[in-house]
Image: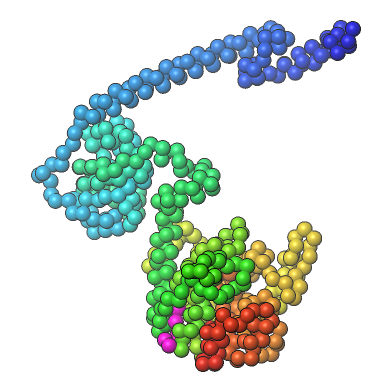
Amino acid sequence: MSSDHCLPTEEKESEEEQLRNQLKEVTLDDFIKLDEQQKNLLPKARRKKLERLLKEQERKEQKAKERAQTLEAERLLKLEESKKIKIEEDPSLPFATPIKIRDVPSYVDKRVTVQGWVHHIREDGKKLLFIELRDGTGFLQCVLSDLLCQTYEALTLHREATVLLKGTLTSDERAKGSFPGIELRVDYWQLIGPSPSEIENILTYESNPDILLNNRHLVIRGTRTSTVLKLRSIITQCFREHFFDRGYVEVFPPTIVQTQCEGGSTLFQLDYFGEPAYLTQSSQMYLETAIASVGDCFCILPSYRAEKSSTRRHLAEFHHIEAECPFINFEDLLFKIEDLVSDVMRRVMEKASHLVLSLNPNIQVPKRPFRRMTYEDAIRYCQENNIYKDEVTKMHFEFGDDIPELPERKMTDQINEPIFLTRFPVSLKSFYMKKCEDNSRLTESVDLLLPGVGEIVGGSMRIHELEELLEAYRREKMDPSPYYWFTDQVCYSNCLLL
């Protein structure tokens, strides 16, 4: 007879004893999963207790189910009853002036009309409904009471519904919003456009990045992201104001080009009426062609980089602020960058400090002058402060190595002040950058690094001698023929460039 099916009595008893010992600590959840044979191995007192707990749980679940059914029935009845409630605007009330939420402080104690989207909803009993309204210019707390919050539209209102509200702006220290202490006491409202109830589950604080990215059109309605959009507009405005104030002319170079600027591997290629073309990596080479026409000039246009990366410093598409100046030297260049960054930050803080501080409460306008530090100084600093090229092998940086974002930021954060990192090796920079007169291995180039951010500006002097430019083409193994127009800048300009 096979021993697989007939175990000795001692072994059976031993296995049952082991199972009994395991079942001594069984929980209610475990008990529910046991079969009848396993339950019989439990001590009687333990089994009776678990069975009693199970019945109590089943009673609670049944009671909760019945309660939910009752509440649902009451909700449906309430909805049906609410359809009978109709509200009308009182014609005896003063005219409600249409305003934007940004204008609220000028209309306190006056009757107004505001329109926008429901940002948040909160009920307080059966006769009070608080709506945080958003219209793109700000947020306003609005209070609906009595019949206004008992209509069918009010009971089925969800976030992102579009509404029109009329009422009186009233001071109340408890009110929140863009103007704390002011709320709208609504006396009439209309639902302009409902929103689906699914909105309450699509975007939550727990939503993962994929959901947020796939619903970006909804995410930008949030407080933080909408603030970023507004600040971007203000910052762009401040850059333009700075440049115009300094006498620059804004120009608009093409973004579909036939030449590379930052390296062929990062080009997006496309068919341009049967000829190969690319989305520009930078507008600066075209921008240079304008300086002999308009002098100091700048542009704010999209640039594209076809490099796959998951870091926050790499984007396939971004708006690039670029400027070109003739007849300057390297020290002039550093001064202009320092002036640009400090002045733009000052302008932004004057216009929208409340928005900036809501995103970064600790931000400060950097003090001038910025610290100067050469590439060789940076290599030495990393070596002396154990900032490694490879953290695993503890390999140090050597001259000629590119310092990636992470160790560069680590160095900048340790120094904790703005840094002009200058004089990079020729091998690390673009072909058109001018070599240093005292060291042909280095270029008159600069990156501006900020603590907590990293690189924010890159610049250089440009080659202004024909033979040096032709040698740069040869060194980078570039065909100079597509760049004939860029070469002409040296032939016909021969001036120092930013």
Is residue 182 visible to the viewer in this orientation of the structure?
yes
* Image coordinates for residue 394, horizontal then vertical, percent: 78, 62
Q: Is residue 77 left or right of residue 405?
A: left
Residue 472 picture quarter: bottom right
Q: Quadrant of residue 426?
A: bottom right
> Residue drawn at (47%, 58%), measured in percent from left and top?
359
Question: Which of the 4 quarters of the picture holds residue 418?
Answer: bottom right
- In the image, is residue 51 above or below residue 163? above
Residue 404, placed above or below residue 216: below
The residue lying toward the viewer, choosing from 335 and 236, is 236
Q: Is residue 315 part of the magenta span, yes or no?
A: no
Q: Is residue 190 left or right of residue 450?
A: left
Residue at image location 84% in from the left, 10% down from the top: 5
Q: Image height check: is 468 above or below 356?
A: below
- Residue 146: percent from left, percent from top: 23, 34
Percent coordinates x, y for residue 174 in the rendering: 33, 46
Q: Residue at x 63, y 8 (%)?
A: 48
Q: Which residues are magenta?
A: 293-298
Whether 47 is drawn above or below 323: the answer is above
Is residue 431 in view from this perspective?
A: no
- Residue at point 37%, 22% (across, down): 71
52 horizontally vs 144: left or right: right
